[in-house]
Image (cartoon, rainbow, N blue to C red):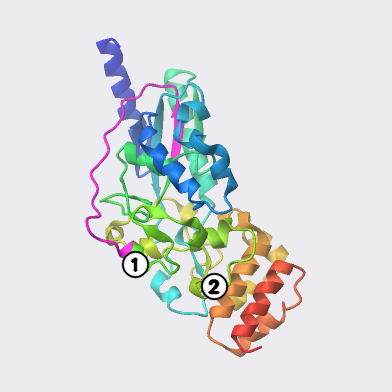
Amino acid sequence: MEPSATTDIEALARTIRAWGREAGFGAVAFSDVDLTMAEPGLLAWLEAGFHGGMDYMARHGLKRARPGELVPGTVSVITARMDYWPAEAVSADAVLGDGGRAYVSRYALGRDYHKVLRTRLQQLADRIAAAIGPFGHRVFTDSAPVLEVELARKSGLGWRGKHTLLLDRSAGSWFFLGEIYTDLALPPDAPVSEHCGTCKRCIDVCPTRAIVAPYRLDARRCISYLTIEHAGAIPEELRPLLGNRVYGCDDCQLACPWNKYAQPAGLPDFAVRNGLDDASLTELFRWTETEFESRMEGSAIRRIGYERWSRNLAVGLGNAPTTADVVAALQARRDDASVLVREHVIWALARHGH
C-alpha cells in the first residue's frame, strides 16, 4: 500500500470512530478476520453439548469463526459497543430480594436491542458509503453465526471475563455488541490485557452453577438459556433455582466488581417500558395473550412468545412466598390451553400445597 493510501485508511478509521460515537456507540474498534485461535474452544464447547437445544450453533460450526466464509470478501470487522445500563430502573437487588416481584434481565427492560443496534450500524455503514462510495459490507447484531465476543476482544473493546462476557475497565459489561463485516482493509486494533485476576465472584454467584469453569458456560444450566432459548419444560430440579427470574439472569454481571464503572444507557430506547423493572409476578401472569402481544410490541421479550413467558412466570410463582393472590393466579390457569404452561402451573401449585 502506498504511503498516501495508508494515511487515507487511517484517517478513515479515525473518522469511523467519531461517527460511531455520534451514532450512540460507546466505542468502535477494528479487527482482522483471523479467529483460528478461537476454533478449538468453539469445537470443544459444541462437542460437550453445552449449546443445549441451540442447534444452529452446531449447524453453523466453524463458520462462526471464519468471517470470510460467512460473508465472502470480508477482510475487516468494525466492532461496536452500546451501553444499556438502565440507571433509572428499580434496583436489581431489591427486585431479586422480593420473591413476589418478577425479575427481568436489565437488557430487556426497554426496546429490543436488535432493532436499535442494527439501525444504528446501518446508518454508520451508509455514512461511510456516502463518504467513500459503495463498499462491501453486512451488519450483524446477535443475528447470525458471529463470534461477537471474540471479535470484540480481538479489536480491543475489552477482555473476556470468566463468565464469558466481554469486560471493559471503563464500562463493565452492561453493553450490547454489534459488527459490520466489510471489505475495507481497516487497521486492526490491539487486544487489551485481562483484569479479572483471581476474582471468581461470577462463578460463585451463579444460581445454577452454569459457569462450570472459568470461561466455560454450560448453557443447559444457564437461566438466560432456560427462560429464553429453551422451548420445552424447564428441568424440574432447576426450577427452584430460578427464583423470580422470569426472563434472563444478570447475577454474574451484578456480582462483577468492574460493573461499578457501568455506563448508563445513552439512548432513550433502553428506558424502562411497561413497568417491567418493578412488576409483580401475579400481575404479569394475569396478562392475556392479546395483552402480552400488545404490551411487548418492540420488546425483545416478545420473541419468546406468550407460552414461554407464561411458563417462566409459573415457575416464578412456584418459588414465590405463599399468598392468597399467588395461589389464585395459579388456580386461574390450572386448565391453561397450553400443555407446557399447565405442567408448570401444577408444579407451582404443589409447591404451595395445592
Secondary structure under the numbered disc 1 in the rendered image: helix
Where is residue 259 drawn, in percent x and y?
31, 59
The reply, left or right, for residue 3 in relation to residue 36 is left
Where is residue 229 drawn, in percent x and y?
57, 55
> Quick check: is 193 in the magenta stretch?
yes
Up the image or down, 141 lies above or below 290; here it is above
Front position among marks 2 and 1: 2
Q: Residues within 10 Å of mark 2 (few under 14, many from 20)?
A: few
Q: Is residue 24 visible?
A: no
The amino acid type found where label 2 is placed reads Glu
> Quick check: is 296 in the magenta stretch?
no
Q: Residues within 10 Å of mark 1 (few under 14, many from 20)?
A: some
The amino acid type found where label 1 is placed reads Asp
Q: Which mark is residue 204?
A: 1
Up the image or down, 254 lies above or below 172; here it is below
Residue identifier under label 2: 237
Query: How much space separates mark 2 and mark 1, taking CA atoms?
Result: 19 Å
| Extent of the magenta region | 178-202
* Towards the viewer: 215 or 174: 215
Main secondary-structure element of the magenta-colored stretch? loop
